[in-house]
Image (cartoon, rainbow, N blue to C red):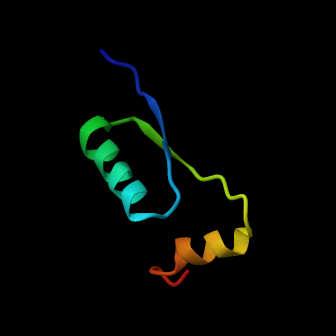
Amino acid sequence: MVEDRKVGVGIDFSKNSKNALKWAIVNMADKGDTFYLIHINSNSSDESRSKLFAKTGS
């Protein structure tokens, strides 16, 4: 039996990184795996937070 995996995916809120995340989930994810979204922000963290929650309204 394969152990649960930890998978890291780098994101920057661009269309391409969102597509890469979708690809990773569809092609790599198995039940029990953990996905870590990795975003390094060298600018203002308020800008990233605004983009992250813009659609959900949170």
**Image position of 18 with respect to 24: above or below:** below
For the point 51% across and 84% down, which residue is it?
Answer: 57
Of 21 and 4, which appears nearest the observer?
21
The quadrant where residue 49 appears: bottom right
Q: Is residue 3 left or right of residue 48?
A: left
How many marks do you count on the picture? 0
Of 1 and 9, which appears nearest the observer?
9
**Image position of 31 with respect to 37: above or below:** above
Q: How far from the left and from the top, in percent, is residue 43?
A: 73, 65
Quarter occupied by the N terminus:
top left
Quarter occupied by the C terminus:
bottom right
Q: How far from the left and from the top, in percent, is residue 13?
A: 49, 64
**Image position of 19 with respect to 3: above or below:** below
Q: Residue furthest left?
A: 27
For the point 51% across and 81% down, which residue is it?
Answer: 54
Of 31 and 20, which appears nearest the observer?
20
For the point 33% across and 43% down, which residue is it?
Answer: 24
**Image position of 2 with respect to 12: above or below:** above
For the point 33% across and 18% down, which residue is it?
Answer: 2
Q: Residue furthest top?
A: 1
Of 33 and 9, which appears nearest the observer?
9
Q: Is residue 42 left or right of residue 25?
A: right
Q: How far from the left and from the top, in percent, is residue 44?
A: 74, 70
The quadrant where residue 14 appears: bottom left
